[in-house]
Image: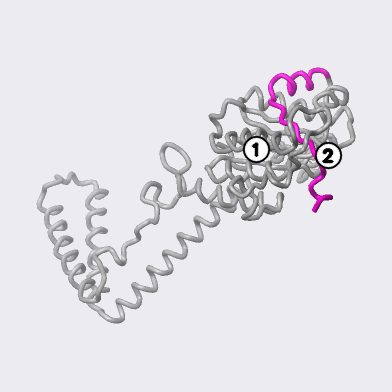
């Protein structure tokens, strides 16, 4: 799983703010309880002194037996002090660990990482930050999810040249998209091609998929074909170090995310550089077994005419085409 750098930075910053906030609360409570019960501060100071004595014995150079008299004496003193501390806190109405620095996540100690990789707490924050970014790009609202998708806005009348009405077709398209999102990444279809005219729900369904997959803890990148090609062109031709670094980061997130949703393919000027960039993205993600959704107004036949035979072959052979047709819903509204 590879979240884009901006998402990761924001999630780590939130994790750090949580740690700072918890430490401030602990410090404020400590100061309050010390003022109410000065003896508590004395006991805590003595406990820290006992820990220091134990550490000095360990690094003193002189062999020390684990059950020797020096260590036994320090342990006895620590237990007595701990018992006093517990009693004093109880008198003040608090538990024995009220002033301890207890992490919110015991798995990672609030660092965000465990020995096996990213902790679940950091993954959750990344998913939240990613959804926030997707919301800004896709204008996602609470209404934009599969449970609130309305099929009655599509015509139930026969459509010229098609065996199913737009409503029946959308019922089938939605079933595939919902299964794809809710079973990601184990759904049998890895790559989708959403093709059809404007105002038929391609972007809406893309947003539904992006929301669902992101909330399940997978990295999702949504962008337009124009922005993607611009990043690859900048990476190739710019001489500005800052622009080149940003373009490389953008290219890595396009190639490395769990799910890439590429919107509006065909709106760009078709140049050799754009064809090369598109082939790199499609081929690299296929080789890496990463999932991709391409949304376009072009049919598969038009894609074959507009782009290279190699690219058309990859998309035609390894993407499942979902065709949208009917009246432009935005004009009807």
In this view, the residue in front, 260 or 276, is 260
Residues at badges 1 and 2 in contact (C-beta under 8 Å)? no
In this view, the residue in front, 259 or 157, is 157
Q: Which mark is residue 287?
A: none
The crowding category of the residue bearing disc 2, from other C-alpha atoms within 10 Å (few below 14, some 14 to 19, many at least 20), is: few
Q: Which residue is mark 2?
A: 238
What residue is rendered at 71% in x and 39% in y?
167
Image position of 70 with respect to 268: above or below: below
Residue 10 lies in the magenta-colored region: no
What residue is rendered at 85% in x and 38% in y?
267
The crowding category of the residue bearing disc 1, from other C-alpha atoms within 10 Å (few below 14, some 14 to 19, many at least 20), is: some
In this view, the residue in front, 66 or 81, is 81
**Secondary structure under the numbered disc 1 in the rendered image:** helix
Q: Please state the total of marks drawn on the protein image.
A: 2
**Secondary structure under the numbered disc 2 in the rendered image:** loop
The residue most toward the bottom is 36
The residue most toward the front is 157
Q: Is residue 235 visible?
A: no
Relative placement, left or right, of 94 versus 282 is: left
Q: Which mark is residue 174?
A: 1
What residue is rendered at 43% in x and 52% in y?
110
Image position of 234 with respect to 57: above or below: above
Counting from the top left corner in percent of width and height, residue 233 is at 82, 36
């Amino acid at each position: 799983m590879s979240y884009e750098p901006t998402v990761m930075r924001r999630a780590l910053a939130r994790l750090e703010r949580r740690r700072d906030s918890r430490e401030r609360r602990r410090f404020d409570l400590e100061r309050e309880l010390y003022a109410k019960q000065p003896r508590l501060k004395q006991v805590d100071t003595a406990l820290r002194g006992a820990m220091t004595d134990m550490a000095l014995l360990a690094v003193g150079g002189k062999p020390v037996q684990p059950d020797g008299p020096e260590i036994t004496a320090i342990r006895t003193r620590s237990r007595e002090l701990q018992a006093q501390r517990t009693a004093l806190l109880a008198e003040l109405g608090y538990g024995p660990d009220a002033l301890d620095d207890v992490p919110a996540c015991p798995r990672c100690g609030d660092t965000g990482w465990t020995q096996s990789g990213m902790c679940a707490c950091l993954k959750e924050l990344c998913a939240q930050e990613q959804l926030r970014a997707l919301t800004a790009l896709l204008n996602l609202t609470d209404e934009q999810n599969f449970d609130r998708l309305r099929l009655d806005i599509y015509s139930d009348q026969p459509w010229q040249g098609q065996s199913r009405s737009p409503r029946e077709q959308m019922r089938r398209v939605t079933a595939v998209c919902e299964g794809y999102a809710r079973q990601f990444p184990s759904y049998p279809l890895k790559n989708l091609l959403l093709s059809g005219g404007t105002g038929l729900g391609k972007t809406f369904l893309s947003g539904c998929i992006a929301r669902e997959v992101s909330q399940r803890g997978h990295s999702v990148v949504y962008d337009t074909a124009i922005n993607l090609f611009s990043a690859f062109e900048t990476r190739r031709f710019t001489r500005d170090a800052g622009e080149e670094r940003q373009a490389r980061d953008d290219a890595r997130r396009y190639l490395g995310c769990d799910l890439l949703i590429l919107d509006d393919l065909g709106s760009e000027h078709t140049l050799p550089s754009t064809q090369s960039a598109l082939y790199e993205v499609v081929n690299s993600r296929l080789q890496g077994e990463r999932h991709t959704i391409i949304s376009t107004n072009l049919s598969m036949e038009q894609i074959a005419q507009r782009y290279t035979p190699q690219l058309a072959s990859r998309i035609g052979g390894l993407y499942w085409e979902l065709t949208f047709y009917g009246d432009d819903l935005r004009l009807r509204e």
